[in-house]
Image (spheres, helix red, strand yellow):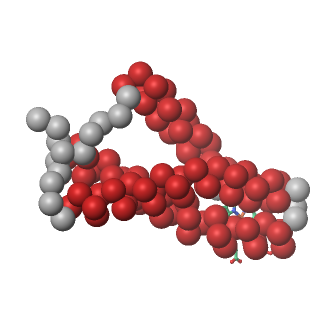
Amino acid sequence: MLSAVATSTLFLACYLTYHYFHGVTRFPGQGAVRPFYFALLGSHTLLAASIVPLVLGTLYHALRARFDQHRRLARRTLPVWLYVSVTGVAVYWMLYHLYPAK
Ligand code: HEM
């Protein structure tokens, strides 16, 4: 789990650096896929913001050997983290591969 946190931190740093210089990419898809894409992106973005305090809190309890509190928080952290990871790849794939900008 420490490796997962370290890798995720590195990814977040690269992601923020990339978006600082590159800005946003508009989604060109039209029709039914558009509301689907924005629902996916919206839920991904909201939960991605909430994952930072969740992971830090889960890690904090584990490192202090407070495993009761760790377990209680981890039951929320893990599914949210998995959802954010999977939808992140789905958003990337839709934006850059399924509907690439012309
Ligand atoms: C953010 C990182 C972490 C996440 C998402 C995470 C997630 C989890 C999950 C989902 C469980 C099972 C909860 C259940 O019983 O339903 C668990 C249990 C546990 N984790 Fe973590 N974990 C993390 C970091 C760590 C670290 C760094 C340690 C070691 C210091 C650790 C030690 C443990 C232990 C000992 C248990 C078993 C507690 C018990 O059943 O009494 N975890 N963790």
Above or below 58: residue 27: above
**55 and 19: which is toward the camera:** 19
Above or below 102: residue 45: below
Quadrant of the drawing holding the N terminus:
bottom right
Which residue lies at the image location 43% right of the left edge and 30% below the top edge?
19
Residue 35 occupies quadrant: bottom left
In the displayed structure image, the side of residue 84 where residue 98 appears, left or right: left
Q: Residue furthest top?
A: 21
Residue 50 occupies quadrant: bottom right
Q: Position of residue 26 (x, y in %)?
A: 27, 39
Residue 64 appears in the figure: yes
Above or below 59: residue 22: above
In the displayed structure image, the side of residue 80 where residue 73 appears, left or right: right
Q: How many circles with numbers are drawn on the protein?
A: 0
Quadrant of the drawing holding the C terminus:
top left
Residue 85 appears in the figure: no
Q: Position of residue 83 (x, y in %)?
A: 48, 64
Q: Position of residue 82 (x, y in %)?
A: 50, 63
In the displayed structure image, the side of residue 73 where residue 11 appears, left or right: left
Which residue lies at the image location 28% right of the left edge and 63% below the top edge?
36
Which residue lies at the image location 69% right of the left edge and 67% below the top edge?
74
Where ligand 1 lies, by image quadrant? Answer: bottom right
Which residue lies at the image location 87% right of the left edge and 65% below the top edge?
66
